[in-house]
Image (cartoon, rainbow, N blue to C red):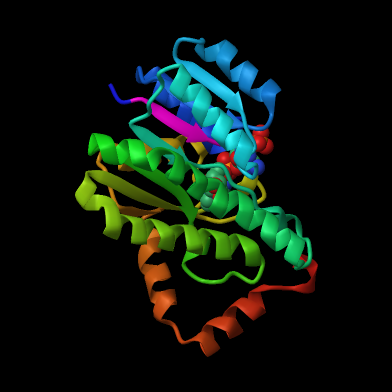
């Protein structure tokens, strides 16, 4: 029975994934910053099935000490799901370089740190599975979310490149491009295609089980997004400028 390490498990999709994985009989180690939420989750799931560390993925020392704690307790995950993410721009803040850096530190570096942590063990074992929770925002720049789009596009490309380099070592890299989900980050979305948290969790774990390489959820949007990728920049920027109003800033 594979064991899982999951980031960002104190709420939303991460918490839903942990609940479902434990229900299926897997051992899970999760991390996030809000200790009260993590304790509450452990109370419901039990200490034998769910361990956690309070850890901020922006802080290298916290990431390293969490990895050391896992190693000491003999926890070596088979699957690593990099789910922690933020999108403060959805609250309508104007562009600043500080804000940009924070989003990139969490969504990109906060994921890649764990790839660094687990990679050597996966290579020694000749097996292991990394999963990045990216977004439809990775496909093209959305005028509302500058840092978010940049961070998720970079995460998607990093995973594509890692796959090319390490898949012969027996390591799988799965990228999940999620559309709106009715959790924390997507709670204000009025998208017709919005998934419930349960739907998102079920579909993500199904993609992980079949070791998919790159998936888009909902699948229906994939064709539209692929078409948008080849749309000339001049036309695309006119469309997104039209969709972005001062009210968004
Ligand atoms: N919901 C959507 O519509 C949607 C769409 C596309 C992609 N996604 C992606 O899905 C993932 C989960 O989103 P969600 O909707 O479930 O959001 P959420 O409910 O806000 O959950 C985000 C999780 O990330 C954790 N986190 C944030 N910053 C962190 C940090 N510095 N260190 C450690 N943990 C941190 C949060 O925990 P703490 O605050 O306790 O640290 C929380 O557990 C994200 O990567 C997001 O980009 C979501």
Q: Is residue 237 above or below residue 205?
A: below
Which quarter of the figure has residue 21?
A: top left
Question: Which residue appears farthest toward the bottom when viewing the image?
Answer: 234
Which quadrant is the N terminus positioned in? Answer: top left
Within the magenta stretch, is there residue 227? no
Q: Residue at x 33, y 49 (%)?
A: 173
Q: Is residue 62 above or below residue 99?
A: above
Q: Is residue 231 left or right of residue 110?
A: left
Q: Quadrant of ligand 1?
A: top right
Q: Residue at x 39, y 75 (%)?
A: 227
Judge whether residue 217 can be spotted in this image: yes
Which residues are drawn in magenta?
Answer: 3-9
Q: Is residue 143 left or right of residue 76?
A: right
- In the rendered image, residue 120, in percent from the top left (x then y), is placed at 35, 40
- In the rendered image, residue 31, in percent from the top left (x then y), is placed at 56, 30
Which quarter of the figure has residue 146?
A: bottom right
Which quarter of the figure has residue 142?
A: bottom right
Within the magenta stretch, is there residue 5? yes
- In the rendered image, residue 97, in percent from the top left (x then y), is placed at 74, 66
Judge whether residue 9 can be spotted in this image: no
Viewer-side residue, 100 vs 236: 100
């Amino acid at each position: 029975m594979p064991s899982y390490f999951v980031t960002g498990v104190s709420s939303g999709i991460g918490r839903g994934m942990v609940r479902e994985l434990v229900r299926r009989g897997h051992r899970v180690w999760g991390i996030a910053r809000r200790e009260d939420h993590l304790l509450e989750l452990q109370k419901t799931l039990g200490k034998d099935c769910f361990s956690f560390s309070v850890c901020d993925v922006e802080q290298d020392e916290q990431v390293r000490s969490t990895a050391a704690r896992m190693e000491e307790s003999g926890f070596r995950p088979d699957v690593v799901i990099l789910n922690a993410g933020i999108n403060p721009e959805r609250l309508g803040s104007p562009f600043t370089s500080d804000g940009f850096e924070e989003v990139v530190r969490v969504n990109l570096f906060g994921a890649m740190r764990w790839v660094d942590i687990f990679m050597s063990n996966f290579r020694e074992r000749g097996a292991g599975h990394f999963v990045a929770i990216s977004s439809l925002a990775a496909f093209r720049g959305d005028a509302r979310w500058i840092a978010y789009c940049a961070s998720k596009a970079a995460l998607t490309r990093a995973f594509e490149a890692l796959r090319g380099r390490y898949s012969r070592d027996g390591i799988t890299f799965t990228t999940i491009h999620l559309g709106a989900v009715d959790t924390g980050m997507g709670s204000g979305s009025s998208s017709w295609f919005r998934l419930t948290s349960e739907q998102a969790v079920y579909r993500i774990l199904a993609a992980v089980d079949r070791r998919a390489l790159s998936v888009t959820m909902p699948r229906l949007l994939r064709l539209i997004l692929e078409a948008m990728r080849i749309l000339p920049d001049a036309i695309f920027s006119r469309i997104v400028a039209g969709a972005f109003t001062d009210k968004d800033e």
